[in-house]
Amino acid sequence: MIDYEKGEGLSDEDSEEAMVVIADDPVTFEEAVKSKTWRNAMEREMEAIEKNKTWDLIDLPTGVKPIGVKWIFKTKLKENGEIDKFKARLVAKGYAQQYGVDYTEVFAPVAKMDTIRIILSTTAQYGWTIF
């Protein structure tokens, strides 16, 4: 894999090779950790998690099963198709939880206000009915 943070300075031939690499973003941590580019992306993600105080580290209570995590890797492109950045996200495997065993609270995702405004303006523009 090419170790570039961005696609700047690549020859045309290398750019084409990088585009092929994009289709092969790592699927596992083991694949990603072999590349300095992806290790840097993971480090940036961990720094962001700490900076934003996304979680608090606590001792695991006795008899409680921890929720697993998974790394997701994605090469982000600019509008012109050049590599913009390599993005790594650490996500919780919430799908593995069982009601009454692992959790009792329900997560309800909330839409951003911009999304709601777009839906409302589109609805008004076309005279649609909101149910």
Image: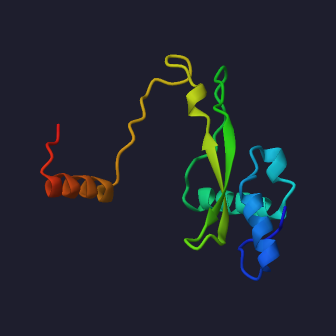
Q: What quarter of the picture does the C terminus occupy?
A: top left
Q: What quarter of the picture does the N terminus occupy?
A: bottom right
Vertical comparison of 79 with 96: above or below: below
Question: Horizontally, is 7 left or right of 117 in the view?
Answer: right
Vertical comparison of 2 with 26: above or below: below
- Residue shown at 35% from the left, 45% from the top: 110
Q: Position of residue 8 (x, y in %)?
A: 72, 80
Residue 75 image-quadrant placement: bottom right
Question: Horizontally, is 94 left or right of 112 in the view?
Answer: right
Residue 122 image-quadrant placement: bottom left
- Residue shown at 14% from the left, 55% from the top: 124
- Residue shown at 67% from the left, 39% from the top: 69
Question: Horizontally, is 84 left or right of 130 in the view?
Answer: right
Residue furthest toward the right? Answer: 34
Q: Position of residue 121 (x, y in %)?
A: 20, 58
Vertical comparison of 73 with 70: above or below: below
Between 44 and 117, the one lying in front of the other is 117
Between 96 and 86, the one lying in front of the other is 86
User: What's the image's color scheme?
Assistant: rainbow
- Residue shown at 42% from the left, 29% from the top: 106
Total marks shown come to 0
Residue furthest toward the bottom? Answer: 9
Residue 35 image-quadrant placement: bottom right
